[in-house]
Image: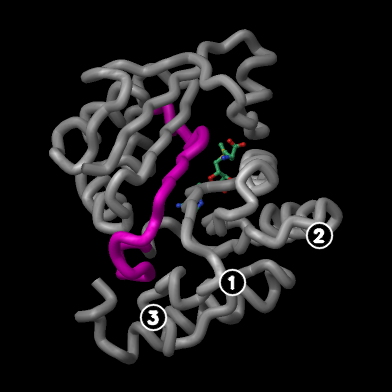
Amino acid sequence: MAQTLPVAIQEKLARILALKAKRGGEFALPFDKDNFPLSVARQFPEYQKFALEIGCGWGEFTRASAAQNTDVMHLAVEKKLARVISSGRDQRREGLANIRYLILDVAWFFEGIFAEQQFNAITINFPDPWPKARHHKHRFISSEFVAELARLAAKDCLLTFATDNYAYAREAMQAFEATDAFKNMQGPFLASCEIEGRPRSFFETLHRNEGALIYFLRYLKA
Ligand SMILES: C[S@@+](CC[C@H](N)C(=O)[O-])C[C@H]1O[C@@H](n2cnc3c(N)ncnc32)[C@H](O)[C@@H]1O
C-alpha cells in the first residue's frame, strides 16, 4: 500500500503517471507525488460520487455512462495510450466533463495508487479472457485483486463484471463469493444476461453481434 511504499518508489510511479498523462490529452489525470495515493474526493471536490472502470478500451461504455450520470466523476483505467487518446477526442466532441483517464496497468493497483473506500461504482467490462490455460495467470481476477477492489470500494458500491466467457464468469464468481466483502445481488452464483438501460461497450456489441451470451455479475460492497 502507498502509505508504506518507500517515498522513492512513490515518486517514481508518480513521475511515470505524470508523463503518461501529459501524452494522454486534456482528460488524462495529472499526477504528482503530493496526491499519492490518489484521493478522488480531494482531486475533484465538486463531485460526491465516483465510478471506477477498469480496462475501458475506446470508452464507449464510459462516455455513455458519464452522459447518463453527469453527477458522477468517472475514472477510467486503461493501459493503452492510443485508446485513451481516442476516447478523449470523442469525449471533447461530446462535451462530457466528468471522465478522467488513468493510463496505467491494473497491476499497479497493488502498489497502492488509490486511497481506500472511495468508489461508489466499479465496472469491469469484458476483460481479456485469456482462454488458454497457460495464459490464465494474465487474468485480472484473483483473490488479491478482489481484496484490493474491496479496499477501494465505498459501502454499497455497485460492482459489475461483464464477460461473454462462461468459464471466466464462474471463476470471477468464485473469487467474489469467497469473501464477505461483496454480496451477489442476484443470489449466490447467479448472473444475468441483460441489464435494461445499460449502455453497451464495444466488446459487448461485438459479442452480441456474434450471437454470444453475456454474463453480468453484480455485487454490492458490504
Ligand atoms: C477486451 S478489451 C475490453 C474493452 C472495453 N471494456 C469493452 O468492453 O469494449 C480489454 C481492455 O482492457 C485493457 N487492459 C488489459 N489488461 C490491462 C491491464 N493490465 N491494465 C489496464 N488495462 C488493461 C486492454 O488494453 C483493453 O482495452
Residue 10 position, x and y percent, is 36, 83
Helix, strand or loop status at disc 3: loop
Q: Which of 199 and 106 is in front in this view?
A: 199
Q: Residue 36, which numbered label?
A: 3
**Quadrant of ligand 1 in image:** top right
User: Which of disc 2 and disc 3 is earlier in sequence?
Assistant: 3
Few, some or many C-alpha atoms within 10 Å of disc 2 (few <14, some 14-19, many ≥20)? Answer: few
Residue 82 visible? The answer is yes
Q: Mark 1 points at which residue?
A: 29
Please name the residue shown 33% across and 28% down the image: 133
Q: Nearer the viewer, residue 84 or 186?
A: 186
Residue 131 forms part of the magenta stretch: yes
Residue 3 position, x and y percent, is 24, 80
**Residue type for callout 1:** Leu
Please name the residue shown 36% across and 61% down the image: 118
Few, some or many C-alpha atoms within 10 Å of disc 3 (few <14, some 14-19, many ≥20)? Answer: some
In the image, taking residue 94 as reference, residue 156 lies left or right, namely: left
